Image (tube, rainbow, N blue to C red):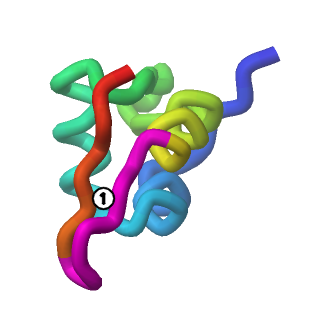
Amino acid sequence: MTEFIKPGEAARMIGVSRDSIRRYVDLGLIRGIKTPGGQRRIDRESVDSMIQRRIEVAPNVTIIGAE
């Protein structure tokens, strides 16, 4: 079963803002859904996948590699 998490939790896991998480979902970089109430939920597996693909090139610069 797919586990969905709140955008704030996904943002903390990846190290970005909640706005970035919304953009990533809109761009199709990570999977997300909207609840019937209009709240976003993020697929934890796609967040974990993004974490595995990221490369830190400097303390304040991170590159997310392609799948």
Residue 50 placement, left or right of 3 = left
Residue at the (50%, 48%) spot, across then down: 51
Could you say which is closer to the camera, residue 49 or residue 11?
Answer: 49
- x, y percent for residue 28: 26, 19
Residue at the (26%, 62%) spot, across then down: 62
Q: From the image, which quarter does the C terminus lie in? A: top left
Total count of labels: 1
Predominant SS of the magenta segment: strand
Task: Check disc 1 and report its element: helix, strand or loop.
Answer: helix
Up the image or down, 27 lies above or below 50; here it is above
Amino acid identity at mark 1: Arg
Residue at the (39%, 50%) spot, across then down: 54
- x, y percent for residue 57: 25, 68
Q: Does the segment drawn in magenta span residue 54?
A: yes
Q: Quadrant of residue 60?
A: bottom left
Q: Does the segment drawn in magenta span residue 55?
A: yes
Could you say which is closer to the camera, residue 41 or residue 38?
Answer: 41
Residue 21 placement, left or right of 46 = left
Q: Mark 1: few, some, or many residues within 10 Å (few <14, many ≥20)?
A: some
Name, please, the residue furthest toward the front: 57
Residue at the (23%, 77%) spot, across then down: 58
- x, y percent for residue 32: 43, 25
Q: Quadrant of residue 59?
A: bottom left
Up the image or down, 51 lies above or below 44; here it is below
Q: Which residue is mark 1?
A: 18
Up the image or down, 27 lies above or below 4; here it is above
Residue 2 placement, left or right of 59 = right
- x, y percent for residue 41: 50, 35
Q: Quadrant of residue 19?
A: bottom left
Could you say which is closer to the camera, residue 49 or residue 2?
Answer: 49
Magenta region: 53-60
